[in-house]
Amino acid sequence: MDRKSLIITMSVLLGLNSAILADYLGVHIPLARQIFGFIALTFFPGYLLLKIFRTRLESFSEKIFLSVALSISVVMLMGIFANFVYPLLGVEKPITLLPILLTFNVVTLGLLAVEQARTVPMLNTRRQIRIAKWDLFFALLPVWSLIGAYLFSHYGDNSGLLLLYFVIALTPLVFLKSKNFNRTFAIWSIAISLMWSTVFGVSWNYIWGYDINGEYYYANLVLARGIWSISTYDQYNTIASVNILGPVYSLILNMWIVPIFKIIYPLVFSLVPVILLKAYERLLGNKIWAELSVLFFMFFFQFFVSNMALARMMIVEVYLALLAYATIRKINPLFLILFLASLAVSHYGTAYLTMFALLTLPLIRVLENEQRISNKLIAVFWVVTLLWYAYVGGGFQFNNLVIIGYQTLLMLKDLFNPQYSQGLELIVAKMTFMREIAKLINLFAQGLISIGVLTVLNRLIRGRKVKHLEFYALSFAFFAYDIAGIVVPYFSNRMNVNRLYHLTQFFIAPYLLIGFDSVKRIMNNLSKNRHTLPLKNSVEIAGVFLVVYFIFTSGWTLVIANDPKPPMWLEKVDGPYWSLSEISGGKWIAEYRYDSLKIYSDQYRALLFLGLINQNINEVSFRGEEKISNFPKREAYAYLGKTSVREKKILVINQKYLGTIKEFYYLPIYNKSIFEGLWTSNKIYSSQDVAIYKI
């Protein structure tokens, strides 16, 4: 019997249930329910599973991220089970506090009982803790990030964040020159600091971005109904990572969905770089190479900006990272099934990319006898993914997959046409000076990655033994996705080219260092013939490159150089985020609108109503050229936000623009001919930042 596990688990469960009972009796204990609930949901099911299966681990960080990933999987599957089985037993609202709490207690106590029957302990991964000066430095980064984010969000002061970004840009040099510090903790610290700088910096109190508004609506809908109805035909209604996981955390922790998305999800997501670090260390056999590869992965803005507005991506990427980890470090097959199932139900696009990439593994069985991911597991993943998206969300994403495949075949004649490829259009588009430099830096990185891929392929062709062939097989598939995002019509458009590239980096990031090393070898061979000085240390050059890479790709240089289109996470510009006044006005019209009439607005403000009433932004966003072409003639509302009220201009989408990237521009609001019908309408709401008209 493991008395330590028994005491800790029972103490946390008792604390959680006592806090919930106290709330029910009207005795509120500040933060007790949130703390006990977070620990219980996020760690204990996974921790007990690791103990039950006597999992031998090499480091404390592996125990942490495997415990969290397994716990999230158990919570999602528990919620799915409750949602679909309990109604058959007469429970009409299974996603409410009592059914979920009872189920979680039973599952946890059941795991604890099994664990207590297993007397063989796990490998002890505890080490003597030594704190170096650089550990203190990295411990301060998250605090610095929160302070800088608060000042930027509330007062528009970006000096703290700009300095933070500059310091983070220099961290590759710290990894190169210093040795005596906890490098895993440093990686995590940089990750969470970058995340907090944007998730709280852009908007301290509310969600921001695009798709997260649809996720927010459906998560709230589950809480309001007490059940997840999968029949509604909508992309946001297909994912358990939002429609089950978010509501379960909200119920147990007694928290609004917004802080769940802004606090809990980023904390889980911050483990992704740590998982990749442990995978890359064994893959590359060189710790500094692994560390720089992970920094390269984190320094692309999609990781710490766009993903903060995509709740489902923050969860699914944990399991994509674990897939990479599982190809290098052998894990329990049951755990791998849980991880793959969780990946399948967490995000359709990532699941489809993974589904087809896994088909490369059976092809390399003749080259490598060791199978970490068996053909049976691949078949199970295919079945789970296809069945899930064929039925959940009314089959929306399965139907979407078929349409995408058909359209892609029809458009193959337009390969390399930037009119239909978002990736190629970004390459050929004319940009400002600083953006052109950032683009060239990214293309340079892509060139090095390509050299790295060719290097590994050359080794395989020449018959040289390559370890971890399953990882490399998947990496070739994801590299092919990277290329397809540029040359294949509409391939990158479906997911967004930046998101696609970010997902491919899980498997292609190590090729950057392989590419640097290959270039060094080539140059040294040339130097022997030309009697020039050889290139001594490619790793140091890679470190310096990452400093420059982050300075440009993070948007830091755009702000310093006063670029006309600075990033909204470092400069207060118009974007998909809203003031408290705009949110209040949006909630008012969402509640009091008559007969469910549509609410027209510009693209950024229209997103507010995607989250509040699930209104499709494509139907109500202002479009046109010289005037608003889709302005409603009658029986609708027009919502004007902060930019329109204060700056007397309104954001419009150019409907004649044929490119794959939307073109936004502003029209002056004082020109009455632009807004035919607005000035004869009734203004029914007015505040500091909002004007609402009834048309």
Image (cartoon, rainbow, N blue to C red):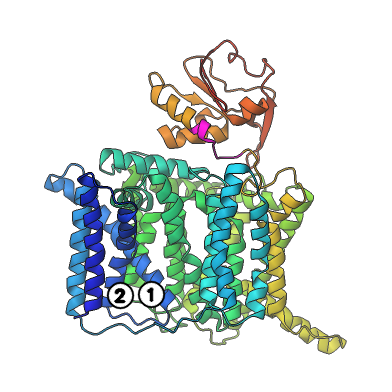
Q: Which residue is mark 1?
A: 63
Q: Which residue appears at 61% of the width and 43% of the height?
A: 155
Q: Which residue appears at 29% of the width and 38% of the height?
A: 224
Against 163, residue 155 (above or below) is above
Q: Is residue 579 magenta?
A: yes
Q: Which residue is mark 2?
A: 50
Structural crowding at the residue carrying mark 1, measured as other residues with C-alpha within 10 Å and reported as few (<14), some (14–19) or many (≥20): some
Q: Is residue 79 left or right of residue 179?
A: left
Q: Secondary structure at mark 1?
A: helix
Residue 74 position in % (x across, y down): 29, 62
Q: Is residue 460 left or right of residue 373?
A: right
User: Residue 626's quadrant in the figure?
Assistant: top right
Q: Is residue 231 visible?
A: no
Mark 2 touches mark 1? (CB < 8 Å)? yes
User: Residue 112's quadrant in the figure?
Assistant: bottom left
| Residue type for callout 1 | Lys
Q: Is residue 670 left or right of residue 412?
A: right
Q: Is residue 226 magenta?
A: no
Q: Secondary structure at mark 2?
A: helix
Residue 591 position in % (x across, y down): 39, 26
Stretch of the chain drawn in magenta: 575-583
